[in-house]
Image (tube, rainbow, N blue to C red):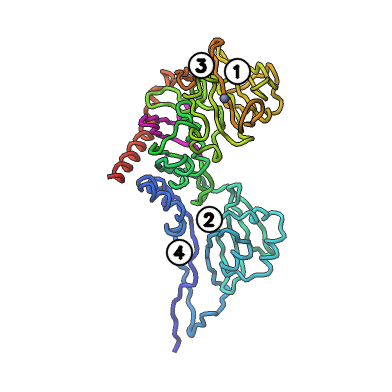
Amino acid sequence: MSLNKYKILAQKPESEPRSLWHQWPVALAILPFFGVVAAFGIAPDTIPEPIELQHIVEEIALPISPFASTEESRYWREERIQRGDTVASVLARLNVNDVDALTYLLQAKDVRSLYQLIPGRTIRVVTTGDGQLESLSYVNTDGRRLHVTRGESGFSSSEELPQTEQWVMQSSGEIETSLFAATDSSGIPEFVALQLAEIFSSDIDFHRDLRRGDRFSVVYEALAADGEFVGFGRVLSAEFVNQGHTFRAVFFRDDQGRNGYYTPDGRNMRKAFLRSPIEFSRVTSGFTSGRFHPVLKTWRAHKGIDYGAPTGTRVRVTSDGYITFVGRKGGYGNVVTVRHPNGYVTLYAHLSGFSQGLRQGKRVVQGEIVGFVGSTGLATGPHLHYEFHVNGVHQNPMRLAMPPGPPITAQSRSAFEEFTQPLFARLDMLRNTDLARLD
Ligand SMILES: [Zn+2]
């Protein structure tokens, strides 16, 4: 008696419809922020792959050995790359048992990108029942999909640009000790945290102004290739509540290509002067006001603002202008002075060094690095002494209202409102989620 039965030998990806992944950003958007972060980290494990599984059914005769090898059978598998993985260790987990394949992958120049394995991404393979590799694919560091396939005359490889799409991520946080501590615990990547500090840098001095209890929300882009995360993108909108004061910003590009961050009513977030000449980074992100003499107490005495920061921290010019002095000058030590339009002058003292090529008369733009924090001259420890003069008179920049950059033009107004309305709506939603969480 012939015992014919059907057995599913393999599940093979037939096509990769985009539809499921198109739902992704929406799905992310409606999750509360911890959910977003968590879902993001583990997505490929818990969310079905973007493939239509087709059962390949083959008629076979019993009895079946579970280890039987059938030349026609194909197994499709994928494995997540772990920290410390090598190509060999991933292939072992994928049950690839194929010396020829390993030799090819180790030696072929075209597959070198496979050696920069990125933890969290997946390697997909199709093998025969006894572990011979038929094909392999992987999204490499350039965001291209590498394909390795077995042909008549051995293995060959090719690369293609995968289907890319943007995911919209969002998250909120509250300051306890520093901005980075808060963004880390909310799962916000450093690249996004730095953008956040930059966007509000004309209004908030992130070295001095942050207080415990300050809150922020941020909506930003992430880029995916073939459904796999490849990198973070631009901040789309953000809110920062600093000492009870709410600042909001949204990214907008008009049809002339002018772009930047704007307030909800279309004013430019960028002011003529940055609040702080110290480049914001992980090492400078703590509360510094306690470590150095507070501004207001010493302001009258030495007419400058001191920023305690590690030696070598980058010092940036706070506005466009021309260098009027570079060199050593008495108690200032190494000092740079810059003349700006409308009678403004800034001074940066006690530097350990200057940036290369800096000389008198050189034009500098806002944010350009002019030197590095040090303790030259009359300084008890590494810090930047920053002075701000208006028409030859020392002024406390913290007390000055700085003139802003150009606002949204009248022609772009309606496009601006249409584009930014949903982004501000997201911030409203994040704020309400936050409040609900606190109740
Ligand atoms: Zn000083």
The residue to which callout 2 is attached is 120
Label 3: which secondary element = loop
Mark 1 or 2, nearer chain start:
2
Indicate the quadrant where residue 109 lies: bottom right
Looking at the image, do the residues carrying marks 1 and 2 touch, with CB atoms under 8 Å apart? Answer: no
Q: Position of residue 239 (x, y in %)?
A: 40, 34
Question: Which corner quadrant of the figure contains ligand 1?
Answer: top right
Circle 2 packing at 10 Å, graded few (<14), some (14-19), many (20+), is: some
Indicate the quadrant where residue 412 lies: top left
Task: Note whether 6 is above or below 159 in the view shown.
Answer: below
The CA span between labels 1 and 3 is 18 Å
Task: Note whether 214 is above or below 58 in the view shown.
Answer: above
Looking at the image, do the residues carrying marks 4 and 1 touch, with CB atoms under 8 Å apart? Answer: no
Taking the image as drawn, is residue 286 in sight?
Answer: yes
Residue type at mark 2: give it.
Answer: Gly
The residue to which callout 4 is attached is 54
Check residue 247 in the rendering and tell me which mark sits there, or answer none: none
Given residues 408 and 316, the one toward you in this image is 316
Q: Position of residue 291 (x, y in %)?
A: 52, 35
Foreground disc of the pair 4, 2: 2
Mark 4 or 1, nearer chain start:
4
Given residues 280 and 87, the one toward you in this image is 280
Residue occupying the point 51% across, 38% down: 285
The CA span between labels 1 and 2 is 46 Å
Residue type at mark 4: give it.
Answer: Gln
Check residue 395 in the rendering and tell me which mark sits there, or answer none: 3
Residue segment shown in magenta: 233-253
Q: Position of residue 154 (x, y in %)?
A: 69, 64
Residue type at mark 3: give it.
Answer: Gln
Check residue 321 in the rendering and tell me which mark sits there, or answer none: 1
Taking the image as drawn, is residue 50 in sight?
Answer: no
